[in-house]
């Protein structure tokens, strides 16, 4: 065949190329560089050497190309038909990585060309947008690794891969494949790694898997598999990783798995497994996850003791008896919460647990005192002993846990004072000792907890006054002090308080203090059941983020001032407190004689005409002067100093409507604030055309924002503005000033999901389900963006905006581009998200993840199912639902009865969504499904 003209032309230039590569390989790469269109492949220099290009690996002698990686090059679909077959002309090629691009199909020319290459061992098409059925792979005699994960492939997997003679690794995860688990996977049965997770495979685990005796990795998680875990899996003697999570498997756990001496990880969480845990299961394991099943019986003696064991999660089962005394000294995470365990904590082993970072024993029936030995686990980042029957005082040795970030001891019988040693835990982000019997004062040294975001001390017997030093806790977002014996002056609280300040059911008296006027970010203020007296002060109406104020059962008097629309005011139980009366027309008493009425009317008309003439004269003289003053006043509003402004949308209506000057006038007036989220302030700006827009303000002066990056941020916004998804709030334009950034969005007529769902009106199930699916569509789109995943710092029902009751949009997508978590003085949980939505692992990491977004979305699903907010009465919704849904007979108590009672079909769909939500809020990030799997499960729930 005659080579194309560009190819012949390049051959003429080859003498000028200083490289030991064969001329035909140089020509292929230079020709390919024009299709790649990247500075990483620069063929324009006078002496290009392809062996020095990014992603090109040559042999040690530079005599041949061995590997090409174009991962993340943003290859467009338009180039795939020419580029992919072209690369297959390099006959020495051993590895080809095309992952993380925008490729939509595998061209037939690629399959025929590369299929003829002897020596090609690896092909990676993962994280593209490949669609349609899995193609046949003819030839490829030496191919060992094929990765097609994270695409849009569907249909069944039959014999398309059966011709691959040397296949050792196959990854089809995160697609839409259906049918039974494929077993025709290479003629020679050499397969070592089989990853099929996050699809929709159904049926049982096929016995033909046993033909692949060399398997080291078998991942079938997040499918719809049924039946038992087969005993014959124990015959796979080289198996290292076995993942069966999030299926519909039932029956017991085969003891034969303990015979696999190479098995390091076994995960079968979120199934319907029952029976007891086989003794010896962990003899060789490093990681075991059997959480969210129906396992019963005792925790076998010796299960937690093997030296190799590091991760164990048996939470949310029905295990009983005592916690085994022998624990592995190499244990890193131990989760036994939400079982039926009793007895005492095995303190004797604590001194050996120097590596333990997570210890979760919550929601059991453990008894006895907290002993000082807990202080020996000095690597602990999380200690959760909540919802047990523990007693005695808090040991001062807890202050030795210098790395502790989360301490949960609520709902126990702990007594005694609040030890000052705990206030030395400088990394502590969450402290919950509520619903105990603590007494004495709150120590003033509590201000040392500078990274604390949530402090729950409600329902104790604490007395004295709140220490003035509490105002120094600059990270505090939620403070629960209700139902204690506190009294005295109320200090100045930190302005960081956002979620709730609860001072209810104490012994405070006197007028509501002026110190509360600084809480401009506070959403809920609870002053109920005290002895506050006097009028309700007007400054409370200026708290712009306030959504609820509870004043009931005090001694307040006078008229309640006018709070803005949307603020719920609870004032019952104050005898002399009343609402402002509505305007009404007075009614006359006795009927007056007709003559007298006529006389009065005539007199009134004469008087009115006289006054009117005088008023018209006065007004006519002052009309223009008043208008001039108004215009002058508006001109004197200090507008932000603009550094850069730009329209991002191509929509002609928006481009003609958006007026940057008018918008800057709107944001200068606090009266235009319509919404505050964790990081943003939204203004309503009405343009001269009459169209309204959201203008969102980001304050550069906040330390967690990346300063001096205006140019970079502008480029990032241009990328976001090109996103095309109806469930994403994409910016239409922006204005950057010295101190702030202002982003323009369509104005969502229905406001936030939180406002609608938790407002006065009832949201039906059809709307709730449509919102859930829409948000899932938006998140799946963001997580799979071809230019790289877009992660959300703050995903909550307050950042979901509604164009209609069935059209949600995910907001705040740009925050990951401007917020730098490393600038925060505390853990990531200090800046990432709203309380109730923050995944537990964010308390110990500084990395925002897809799994973290999945957790937050799970909480939103729970809100839609239950009708409850993410946090109420000091309890997080995810924790409450997990505790109350472990048994099917309790599910009706979890569902929003106002909605579930409407029909059996609605109830069935709500139950299906509940199961999806529980998978999303799993405490283990690895156990949470990926977003596209969540979307698929939601769509399937429609048929429940």
Image (spheres, rainbow, N blue to C red):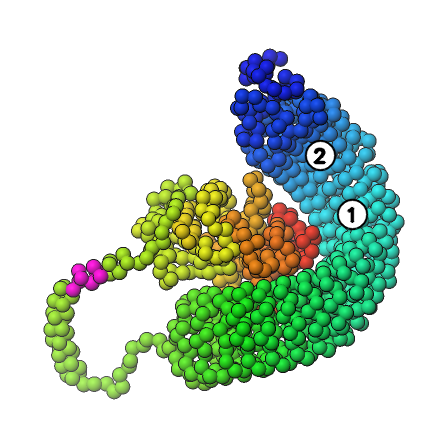
Residue 318 in percent (x, y) is at 77, 64
Q: Residue 471's spot in the image, x, y percent?
A: 52, 71
Pointer 1 residue: 242
* One can see residue 19 in this view: yes
Whether residue 815 appears in magenta in the rendering, the answer is no
Q: Foreground: 562 or 776? A: 562
Label 1: which secondary element: strand
**Residue 867 location (% of width, % of height):** 56, 64
- The residue drawn where x is 57% and y is 65% is 450
Prevailing secondary structure class for the magenta stretch in the rendered image: helix
Q: Residues within 10 Å of mark 1 (few under 14, many from 20)?
A: many
Please state if 259 lies on the left or on the right of 748 as rendered. Answer: right
**Dot 2 lies on which element?**
strand
- Looking at the picture, does residue 529 appear above or below residue 195? below
Q: Earlier in the sequence, mark 2 or mark 1?
A: 2
* Residue with the most extreme bottom position: 590
- The dot on residue 146 is 2
Query: Does 628 lie within the magenta span?
Result: yes
Q: Is residue 871 above or below residue 212?
A: below
């Amino acid at each position: 065949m005659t080579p194309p003209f560009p190819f012949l032309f390049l051959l003429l230039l080859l003498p000028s190329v200083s490289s030991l590569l064969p001329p035909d390989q140089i020509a292929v790469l230079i020709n390919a560089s024009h299709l790649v269109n990247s500075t990483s492949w620069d063929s324009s220099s006078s002496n290009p050497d392809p062996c020095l290009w990014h992603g090109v690996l040559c042999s040690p002698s530079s005599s041949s190309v061995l590997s090409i990686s174009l991962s993340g090059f943003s290859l467009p679909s338009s180039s795939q038909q020419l580029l992919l077959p072209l690369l297959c002309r390099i006959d020495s090629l051993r590895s080809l990585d095309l992952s993380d691009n925008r490729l939509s199909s595998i061209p037939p020319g690629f399959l025929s060309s590369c299929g003829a290459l002897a020596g090609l061992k690896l092909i990676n098409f993962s994280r593209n947008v490949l669609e349609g059925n899995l193609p046949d792979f003819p030839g490829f005699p030496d191919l060992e690794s094929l990765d097609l994960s994270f695409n849009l492939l569907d249909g069944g997997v039959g014999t398309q891969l059966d011709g691959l003679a040397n296949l050792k690794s196959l990854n089809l995860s995160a697609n839409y494949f259906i049918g039974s688990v494929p077993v025709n996977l290479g003629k020679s049965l050499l397969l070592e790694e089989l990853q099929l997770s996050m699809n929709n495979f159904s049926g049982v685990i096929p016995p033909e898997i046993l033909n692949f005796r060399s398997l080291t990795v078998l991942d079938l998680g997040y499918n719809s598999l049924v039946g038992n875990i087969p005993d014959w899996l124990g015959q796979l003697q080289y198996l290292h990783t076995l993942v069966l999570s999030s299926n519909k498997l039932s029956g017991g756990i085969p003891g034969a798995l303990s015979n696999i001496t190479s098995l390091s990880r076994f995960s079968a969480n979120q199934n319907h497994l029952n029976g007891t845990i086989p003794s010896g299961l962990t003899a060789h394991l490093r990681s075991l996850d059997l959480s969210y099943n129906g396992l019963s019986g005792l925790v076998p003696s010796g299960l937690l003791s093997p030296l190799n064991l590091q991760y164990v999660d048996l939470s949310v089962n029905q295990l009983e008896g005592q916690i085994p005394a022998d624990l592995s000294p190499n244990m890193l995470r131990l989760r036994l919460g939400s079982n039926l365990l009793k007895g005492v904590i095995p303190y004797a082993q604590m001194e050996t647990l120097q590596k333990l970072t997570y210890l979760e024993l919550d929601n059991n029936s453990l008894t006895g005192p907290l002993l000082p030995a807990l202080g020996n686990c000095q690597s602990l980042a999380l200690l959760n002993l909540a919802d047990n029957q523990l007693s005695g005082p808090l040991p001062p040795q807890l202050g030795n846990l210098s790395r502790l970030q989360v301490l949960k001891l609520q709902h126990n019988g702990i007594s005694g004072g609040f030890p000052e040693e705990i206030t030395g835990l400088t990394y502590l982000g969450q402290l919950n000792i509520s619903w105990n019997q603590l007494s004495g004062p709150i120590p003033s040294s509590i201000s040392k907890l500078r990274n604390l975001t949530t402090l729950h001390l409600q329902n104790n017997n604490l007395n004295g006054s709140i220490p003035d030093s509490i105002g120094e806790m600059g990270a505090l977002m939620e403070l629960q002090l209700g139902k204690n014996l506190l009294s005295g002056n109320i200090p100045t609280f930190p302005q960081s308080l956002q979620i709730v300040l609860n001072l209810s059911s104490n012994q405070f008296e006197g007028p509501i203090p002026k110190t509360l006027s600084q809480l401009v970010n506070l959403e809920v203020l609870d002053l109920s059941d005290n002895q506050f007296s006097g009028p309700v002060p007007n400054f409370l109406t200026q708290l712009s983020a306030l959504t609820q104020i509870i004043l009931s059962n005090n001694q307040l008097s006078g008229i309640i001032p006018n709070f803005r629309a949307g603020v719920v005011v609870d004032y019952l139980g104050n005898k002399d407190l009343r609402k402002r009366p509505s305007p009404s027309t007075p009614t006359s008493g006795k009927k007056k004689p007709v003559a007298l009425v006529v006389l009065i009317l005539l007199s009134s008309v004469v008087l009115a005409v006289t006054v009117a003439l005088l008023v018209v004269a006065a007004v006519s003289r002052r009309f223009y002067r008043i208008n001039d003053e108004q215009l002058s006043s508006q001109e004197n509003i200090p507008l932000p100093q603009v550094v850069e402004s730009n329209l991002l949308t191509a929509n002609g209506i928006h481009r003609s409507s958006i007026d940057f000057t008018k918008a800057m006038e709107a944001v200068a007036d606090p009266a235009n604030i319509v919404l505050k989220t964790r990081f943003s302030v939204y203004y309503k700006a009405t343009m001269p055309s009459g169209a309204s827009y959201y203008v969102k303000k980001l304050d550069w002066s906040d330390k967690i924002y990346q300063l001096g990056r205006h140019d970079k941020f502008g480029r990032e916004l241009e990328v976001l503005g090109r996103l095309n998804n109806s469930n994403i709030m994409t910016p239409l334009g922006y204005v950057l000033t010295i101190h702030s950034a202002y982003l323009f969005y369509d104005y969502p007529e229905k406001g936030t999901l939180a406002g609608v769902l938790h407002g006065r009106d009832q949201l039906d199930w059809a709307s709730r389900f449509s919102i859930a699916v829409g948000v899932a569509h938006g998140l799946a789109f963001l997580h799979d963006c071809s230019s790289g995943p877009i992660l959300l710092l703050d995903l909550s029902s307050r950042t979901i905006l509604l164009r209609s009751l069935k059209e949600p949009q995910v907001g705040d997508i740009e925050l990951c581009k401007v917020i730098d978590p490393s600038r925060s003085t505390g853990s990531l949980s200090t800046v990432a998200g709203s309380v109730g939505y923050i995944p537990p692992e964010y308390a110990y990491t500084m990395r925002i993840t897809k799994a973290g977004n999945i957790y937050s979305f799970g909480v939103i699903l729970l809100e839609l199912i239950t009708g409850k907010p993410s946090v109420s009465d000091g309890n997080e919704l995810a924790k409450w639902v997990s505790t109350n849904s472990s048994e099917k007979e309790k599910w009706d108590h979890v569902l929003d009865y106002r909605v579930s009672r409407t029909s059996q079909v609605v109830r069935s769909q709500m139950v299906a969504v509940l199961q999806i939500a529980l998978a999303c809020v799993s405490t283990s990030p690895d156990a949470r499904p990926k977003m596209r799997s969540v979307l698929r499960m939601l769509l399937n729930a429609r048929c429940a």
